[in-house]
Image (cartoon, rainbow, N blue to C red):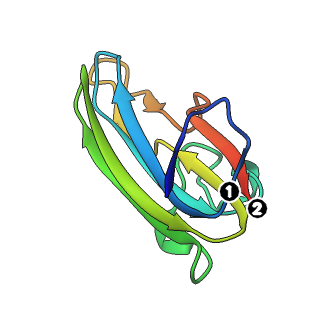
Amino acid sequence: MSSSWNPTLRRLARGEVEIVGDNKGGETHELVMVKSADAAELPSTRMVAVVEDELSEGAFVGEIEDIEAQSSKVVTFDLEAGDYVLFCNITEEDQDSGEIESHFAEGMHASFTVE
């Protein structure tokens, strides 16, 4: 049996969980899932982006890549008990100002617990 996760849920039953990346915005996003208690604990460059290569061994669970604007993708993960963070790790540089736009730094992350 699988259950669906939505960002308002904070506790899920272990087992198969269907994650729907439903991008209602105007730019591409992704969803990266890692085992961690809190987004602030993830290795990052000044909370701009998570450095995925520096995640502890076994922390990376999976991801949904390149969810285009106004589209959706669905992936099912088999999750064991523990704490998880789901986040968008896309960064873009503004061509005019040179400023870095970070979806992670803008708060595109959510924590939840699997029991």
Which of the 4 image quarters holds residue 28? top left
**Callout 2: few (<14), some (14-19), or many (20+) C-alpha neighbours within 10 Å?**
few
Q: How many marks?
A: 2
Which residue is label 2 attached to? 115
Residue 62, position as x, y percentages in the image = 42, 64
Are the residues flagged by discs 1 and 2 in contact, CB closer than 8 Å?
A: yes
Mark identifier at residue 13: 1
Q: Compared with residue 97, is residue 80 higher up or lower down, i.e. above or below?
A: below
Amino acid type shown at disc 2 = Glu
Q: Quadrant of residue 56?
A: bottom right
- Picture residue at 73% right of the left edge, 41% below the top: 10
Residue at 44% across, 49% down: 18
| Above or below: residue 13 compared with residue 80 | above
Residue drawn at the location 65% of the way across and 47% of the way down = 46
Q: Can you give x and y, in whole percent of width and height, for residue 78 in the image?
A: 49, 67
Q: Most extreme residue toward the bottom, as rendered?
A: 57
